[in-house]
Amino acid sequence: MQYKTKLTIMDSTGTAKGTSLRTGVNVPESGIYRTSHSQHNLPYEVTPLKDQKFPRCSRCKEPVLYELVRSAPAASSHPSTFTVALYELPELLPDDELAG
């Protein structure tokens, strides 16, 4: 089994497309994706499955950007297994706010 470490969306001419991997876009490949969202402290990485939609931020309507860190082709290879769809990412609170 081979694992990819980068994903670049290409157009028909072979150049990188201007569209990015972001909230609401279909996940092109199951894997571990790094999140980028300056407005809120979200989980650093998530593992969405192919053909699901990239999840939104639970606190705002600003898009979350995603970058493939590592593919996980086996994650979606068994359609009869139990899966969880991730619709939104929770804001992570600092440890001191959780204690009190």
Image (tube, helix red, strand yellow):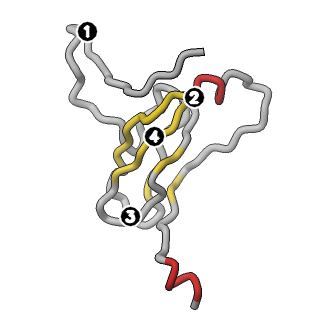
Which residue was labeled with disc 2? 72
Q: Residues within 10 Å of mark 1 (few under 14, many from 20)?
A: few
- State the count of labels: 4
Front disc: 3 or 2 = 2
Residues packed near mark 4 inside 10 Å, few (<14), some (14 to 19) or many (20 plus): many
Closest to the camera, between mark 4 and mark 3, is 4
Q: Which amino acid does label 4 sit on?
A: Tyr
The Cα atoms of the two marked residues, 3 and 2, are separated by: 29 Å
Which numbered mark, 2 or 1, is in the foreground of this view?
Answer: 2
* 10 Å crowding of disc 2: few (<14), some (14-19), many (20+): many
Residue at label 3?
A: 60
Q: Which residue type carries mark 1? A: Ser
| Cα–Cα span, label 2 and label 1 | 26 Å
Where residue 6 appears, as percent x and y from the top left, is: 38, 27
Which amino acid type is shown beneath numbered disc 2?
Ala
- Which numbered disc, 4 or 2, marks the residue that appears first in the sequence? 4
State the image coordinates of residue 29 (x, y, percent, origin top left). 50, 26
Residue for badge 1: 12
Percent of width and height locating residue 99: 58, 86
Q: How far apart are marks 1 and 3 (CA)?
A: 34 Å
Alpha carbons under labels 1 and 4: distance apart: 25 Å
Horizontal and vertical percent position of residue 60:
38, 64
Q: Which mark is residue 26?
A: none
Q: How crowded is mark 3: few (under 14 residues within 10 Å), some or many (20 or more)?
A: few
Q: Which SS class for mark 2?
A: loop
Q: Which mark is residue 33?
A: 4
Residue at image location 48% in from the left, 32% down from the top: 70
State the residue in front, 5 or 91: 5
Nearer-N-terminus badge (2/1): 1
User: Label 4, label 2: how many angstroms apart (C-alpha)?
Assistant: 10 Å
Residue found 60% across the figure and 15% down from its top: 1
Is residue 52 shown left or right of residue 10?
A: right
